[in-house]
Structure formats: C-alpha cells, structure tokens
Image: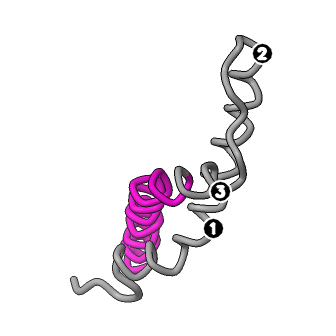
C-alpha cells in the first residue's frame, strides 16, 4: 500500500503558524497565572518567541497524528 496525500513534514509546515500562535497564547496565559505566585508577566515579544520554539515539537506531533488518522482512513476505505 502506498501512502497517498501529504507527508507529516508537509502537514507540519502548513500548520506551524497556527501551532506557534496557539503556543504563544498559552505561554502568555501561563505567565499570567504564574504572576499570581509572584512571577513576571511575559511581554508579547517573549511570548511569541517562546511560542515559536514550543510550536515546533507541538506541531510536529500533531502533524504525525493527522498523518496517522489519514492512513487509518485510507486503510478503512480499502476494506469496503
């Protein structure tokens, strides 16, 4: 069976802006929660930079999951 559709790498590249943006928002909100315990609130620049770094592995794992779901769907489609 050959794999049809996009590779996990191509999916990750396409979804990276969304993954990095989501990670940046989560980092900022985490810093707000941490500020309740006396920690600093991160600036927008720091949040975006950390989100860009954290977004790489998060998007990669998500893309692999999507590729797996595509493979399962293709396998189930061949059985019918």
The residue lying toward the viewer, choosing from 4 and 30, is: 30
Residue at image mark 3? 45
User: Which numbered disc, 2 or 3, marks the residue that appears first in the sequence?
Assistant: 2
Tell us which disc is closer to us: 1 or 2.
Answer: 2
Alpha carbon of mark 1 to alpha carbon of mark 2: how far? Answer: 28 Å
CB-based contact (under 8 Å), mark 2 and mark 3: no
Can you give x and y, in whole percent of width and height, for residue 27 in the image?
63, 42
* Label 3 element class: helix
Alpha carbon of mark 1 to alpha carbon of mark 3: how far? Answer: 17 Å
Q: Residues within 10 Å of mark 2 (few under 14, many from 20)?
A: few
Height in image: 52 above or below 27?
A: below
Q: Residue at position x 63%, y 49% from top?
A: 47
Q: Residues within 10 Å of mark 1 (few under 14, many from 20)?
A: few
Please give left or right for residue 50 compared with residue 38 in the image: left
Height in image: 9 above or below 57?
A: below
Q: Magenta span: helix, strand or loop, mainly?
A: helix
Height in image: 21 above or below 38?
A: below
User: Which numbered disc, 1 or 3, marks the residue that appears first in the sequence?
Assistant: 1
Can you give x and y, in whole percent of width and height, for residue 80 in the image?
45, 77
* Label 2 element class: loop
In this view, the residue farthest toward the top is 37
The residue lying toward the viewer, choosing from 15 and 8, is: 15
Q: Name the quadrant containing residue 28.
A: top right
Q: Magenta region: which residues?
A: 51-80
Residue at image mark 1? 18
The residue lying toward the viewer, choosing from 31 and 56, is: 31
> Mark number for residue 36?
2
Alpha carbon of mark 2 to alpha carbon of mark 3: how far? Answer: 21 Å
């Amino acid at each position: 069976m050959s794999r049809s559709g996009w590779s996990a790498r191509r999916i990750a590249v396409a979804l990276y802006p969304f993954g990095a943006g989501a990670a940046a928002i989560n980092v900022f909100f985490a810093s707000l929660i941490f500020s309740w315990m006396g920690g600093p609130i991160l600036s927008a620049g720091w949040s975006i930079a950390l989100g860009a770094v954290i977004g790489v592995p998060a998007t990669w794992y998500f893309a692999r999951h999507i590729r797996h779901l595509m493979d399962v769907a293709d396998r189930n489609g061949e059985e019918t």
